[in-house]
Image (spheres, rainbow, N blue to C red):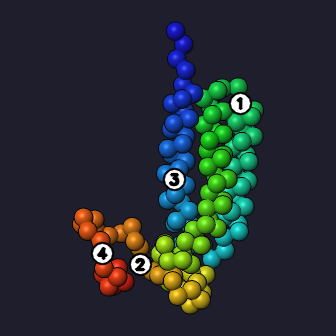
Amino acid sequence: MEINLTGLAAALATFIGVWWGHVAVRKFEANLTHLRPAMGICVLLGLGLWTGALLSDSMPVSAGLGILGMTLLWDAFEFYRQEKRIKSGHAPANPNNPRHARILAEYPSATTTDWLNRDPRGRAYSPEELTKD
C-alpha cells in the first residue's frame, strides 16, 4: 500500500500559509512606509511558487507550492485591505510610521487601539473603555 501525502501537504501548506500570511501582513503593513514593493514581492514569490508547482513531479510538493503561491498572491491584496481597515479604525495604526501618522491625521475613525489586545470578559466593553489606552 502506498501512502498518499498530498492531503497532508495541502493541509500543512494551508495552515502555515494563512497563519504566517496573517501575521506578516499585519507586521509589515504597520512598519513599512511604502506598500507597493512588499506587494510586488508577494506577487513575484507567489507566481514563482506557482511555477514550481506546475513543474514539480511530486503531487504533495506541487499541492504545497500551489497553495503557498496562492496565499502569497492573496497576501499582496491583503496589504491594501489592511490599510483600509486602519483607515476605518478596525486595525491599529502605528503612530511611529509616517504613512500611518498621515492616516491618523486624515481619518478621524483611525485609532492606535489594538482591539485584539484585550482580555475577554463575557460582556461588552463601553465606548469609554475601548478608547482609553
Residue 75 appears in the figure? yes
Residue at position x 66%, y 59% in the image? 76
Q: Indicate the position of residue 68 as horizontal and vertical percent values.
A: 61, 44
Residue named by callout 1: 56
For label 2, count other residues whose C-alpha is less than 10 Å away and answer few (under 14), some (14-19) or many (20+).
some
Q: Amino acid at mark 4?
A: Tyr
Horizontal side, residue 24 vs residue 48: left or right: left
Instruction: Name the N-terminal-most of marks 3 and 4.
Output: 3
Q: Are marks 2 and 4 in contact (CB under 8 Å)?
A: no
Label annotation for residue 20: 3
> Quarter-wise, where is residue 102 in the image?
bottom right
Q: Indicate the position of residue 88 as horizontal and vertical percent values.
A: 54, 77
Residue named by callout 2: 113
Instruction: Name the N-terminal-most of marks 4 and 1.
Output: 1
Instruction: Name the N-terminal-most of marks 3 and 1.
Output: 3
Instruction: Name the N-terminal-most of marks 2 and 1.
Output: 1
Residue at position x 64%, y 39% in the image? 65
Q: CA distance from mark 4 to mark 1?
A: 51 Å
What element does badge 1 sit on? Answer: loop
Q: Amino acid at mark 3?
A: Trp
Residue named by callout 4: 125
Q: Indicate the position of residue 60 as horizontal and vertical percent values.
A: 60, 29
Q: CA distance from mark 3 to mark 2?
A: 23 Å
**Which label lies toward us, 2 or 1?**
2
Residue at position x 64%, y 26% in the image? 59
